[in-house]
Image: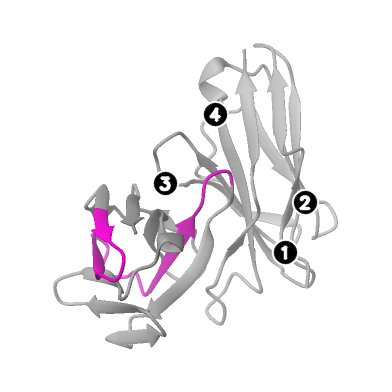
Amino acid sequence: GAGVSQTPSNKVTEKGKYVELRCDPISGHTALYWYRQSLGQGPEFLIYFQGTGAADDSGLPNDRFFAVRPEGSVSTLKIQRTERGDSAVYLCASSLTGGLSSYEQYFGPGTRLTVT
Amino acid sequence: GENVEQHPSTLSVQEGDSAVIKCTYSDSASNYFPWYKQELGKGPQLIIDIRSNVGEKKDQRIAVTLNKTAKHFSLHITETQPEDSAVYFCAARQAGTALIFGKGTTLSVSS
């Protein structure tokens, strides 16, 4: 079946602009995660949704970052007043559930964000 | 919080040799340890995982071992092939939490 999809695959924006990154999880997966991967590093956790609600947003670096998942499926990561330091690959992952019965997380291809 | 250390950062082997990548974790409450393979320009792909109630798991040429007492786990790839060349990440988590990743190992398999 279809895996996790992310759009756009690449996004170039100017410093100070607003961007939205979209994630479409595997059908039926209730848990959705956003990670950020800088060059040469492992993915770093940003936020985790269980259904429509953010179960853990402790990884968001500051209040310029916000994410929503209004219908419990597609999620959008929103970044306001972008800075050059926000440049990275933003990865989305989903898993069947977020609780004790399901652990495996499946990743999308990522969105490469470049802030000039 | 959890901290995952991964070694080595780069590993070069000849085709047909074995490769071993090692990780340590800090939080004894972590109970799930996946390994991901990431090729250039792609997202991480889950290749094998192990839970804390098991000491070893195999899937064809890859295996993972877990030592809960020492808080370390390892990925073993046997009979390496050029297509095994990629960046490999280990990770750890508890149920209901996000994955904490190591910094990755770049594996190069030369023919």
Give the labeled residue for mark 1. A3
Whichever of labels 4 and 2 marks the residue nearer the N terminus, that label is: 4
Whichever of labels 4 and 1 marks the residue nearer the N terminus, that label is: 1
Give the labeled residue for mark 3. A42
Q: Secondary structure at mark 1?
A: loop
Q: Nearer the viewer, mark 3 or mark 4?
A: 3
Q: Chain of mark 2?
A: A
- Do circles 4 and 1 both sit on a common chain? yes
Q: Secondary structure at mark 3?
A: loop
Cβ atoms at labels 1 and 3 below 8 Å apart = no
Quadrant assignment, res A114: top right
Q: Which residue extends farthest right?
A: A71
Q: What residue type is disc 2 on?
A: Arg
Cβ atoms at labels 4 and 1 below 8 Å apart = no
Query: What distance separates the C-alpha of mark 1 from that of mark 3?
Result: 21 Å
Q: Which residue extends farthest left?
A: B70
Residue beneath the point at 44% across and 75% down:
B48
Q: What residue type is disc 4 on?
A: Asn
Query: What distance separates the C-alpha of mark 4 from that of mark 2?
Result: 19 Å
Tell me if mark 3 has few (under 14), some (14-19) or many (20+) residues whose alpha carbon lies within 10 angstroms of its own.
many
